[in-house]
Image (cartoon, grey):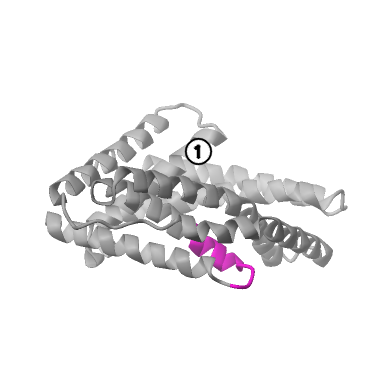
Amino acid sequence: MAMKPKRLHQRWRTELESRLAVIDKLLQTPHPLAAAEVHDLRVALRRARLLASLGCCSLGKSEVKAFRDQAHTLLELLSPIRDCDVALDWFNQTKVCPKLVAKLQAHRERRWHATQRRIRSSRTKLAVAFKARRHFAELEFRLEKKMAEAVQRCRATLKEKQLSIAQLHALRRNVRRWRYLRELRLKPHEQRRDRCLRLLVRVTDALGALQNIEAILSQLRFLGRMKELPQIRVTLRKSFTQLRRDALLRIKALPVAL
């Protein structure tokens, strides 16, 4: 059963305020952000950007544009650090040479120190001025419209016979957007048993695993010519081929409509 417009608007506002609180808290953290904190900050930024866009009738177009632009800048600053974290996690799980781990950890620390001032200064630029609650019907219309657009983008991409890496990344963004919007529409108990949402989560995870392999491979270039690297590259490329096959199978299971 769909939520009533007023209830939907209330939930949207609560979700957005919650994400903004997470962002503000993490940007105030005095120590360098750990891998889990970087991940949480990126998730909160992505969700907040979408929620702000969805509710621009209530927030104001100029405020939403300023917020989205600044959030995008912050996500770009965090992306190289996130790639280091993904590679370090894989290194630790596969128990590679400790020297490689130490070298990549040092690279991660240099990345953080080079950008931490710009990251922390983003806090003052990410404030969103809430306006009075209104335009309930417009918000509901935008939600349905955004979901339909996300579905159409996914289906258009899947018509391609061979998906490039760039297309897979674009597809992941659209699937993730579709997932976030569907979560907003469903009540908590409905989310747990919604087949479409479960499929969207699986596809997002599968495409994310592919992107992680790319991130790890990209980090190897900062490690010089250590003798272990060629075999690591071979292992990662084999994993990429298998993960890509699995991801495409999951993508084909996506529904054709809302």
Residue range (magenta): 30-42
Does residue 70 show up magenta in the picture?
A: no
> Residue 200 vs residue 208: left or right?
left
Between residue 252 and residue 139, name the one nearer to us: 139
Label 1 neighbour load within 10 Å: few <14, some 14-19, many 20+? many
> Residue 230 vs residue 23: left or right?
right
Residue 111 pos. (x, y %): 70, 56
Residue 145 pos. (x, y %): 24, 39
**Residue kind at label 1, given as amino acid type:** Leu
Count of residue discs: 1
Between residue 214 and residue 64, name the one nearer to us: 64
* Quadrant in the picture for the N terminus: bottom left
Residue at 56% across, 71% down: 29
Residue 216 pos. (x, y %): 67, 51
Does residue 41 show up magenta in the picture?
A: yes
> Residue 10 vs residue 243: left or right?
left
Label 1: which secondary element: helix
Give the residue at mark 1.
168
Q: Main secondary structure of the magenta part?
A: helix
Residue at 75% across, 52% down: 232
**Image quadrant assignment for residue 92:** bottom right
Residue at 30% across, 51% down: 181
Residue at 43% across, 53% down: 46
